[in-house]
Amino acid sequence: MSPTPATPIQRCAFAGVRAIILRMAHSTPPNIPQIRLYQNWLRDHRGLKFGSYDELWRWSISDLDSFWQSIWDYFDMHSPTPH
């Protein structure tokens, strides 16, 4: 029996996970935490600067649409449907 083909959503999820893994494996400077890299990206690409993890967390729960869009953009994830 052959495996069931993946749905478009599953293919998108697989591609997103793959993109995250590849980005983390190939672009992480030594000894810099991923959260710091993400904060730097937010500063450079969105003009958002957070003085502490708590400030970042508060933004992430108060502006959900912007937060999740930033995650999709940071990890260069694409979807055939709105997320």
Image (spheres, grey):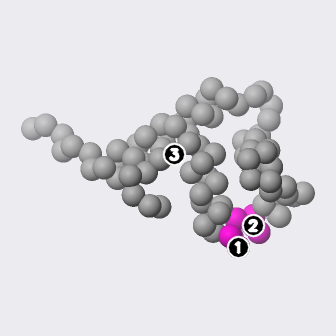
Q: Return the disc, 3 or 1, that comes first in the chain's sequence.
A: 1
Per the image, the residue denoted by label 3 is 77
Measured along the vertical axis of the image, is residue 61 above or below residue 19? below
Q: Residue at x 18, y 40 (%)?
A: 3
Queried whether the magenta region covers residue 59, the answer comes back as yes
Point out residue 17 in the picture as x, y percentages from the top left corner: 48, 42
Q: Return the disc, 2 or 3, that comes first in the chain's sequence.
A: 2
Compare residues 26 and 66 and report the one nearer the observer: 66
Q: Amino acid at mark 1?
A: Ser
Q: In the displayed structure, does residue 75 sit left or right of residue 18? A: right
Q: In the displayed structure, does residue 66 sit left or right of residue 40? A: left
Mark 3 Cα shell of 10 Å, populated few (<14), some (14-19), many (≥20): some
Q: Secondary structure at mark 1?
A: helix
Measured along the vertical axis of the image, is residue 11 above or below residue 81? above
Q: Residue at x 75, y 67 (%)?
A: 59
Q: Amino acid at mark 3?
A: Met
Q: In the displayed structure, does residue 36 sit left or right of residue 60? A: right
Q: In the displayed structure, does residue 66 sit left or right of residue 39? A: left
Measured along the vertical axis of the image, is residue 15 above or below residue 80? above
Q: Secondary structure at mark 2?
A: helix
Mark 1 Cα shell of 10 Å, populated few (<14), some (14-19), many (≥20): few
Per the image, the residue denoted by label 1 is 62
Mark 2 Cα shell of 10 Å, populated few (<14), some (14-19), many (≥20): some
| Mark drawn on residue 59 | 2
Q: Secondary structure at mark 3?
A: loop
Magenta segment, which residues?
Answer: 57-63
Q: CA distance from mark 3 to mark 1?
A: 22 Å
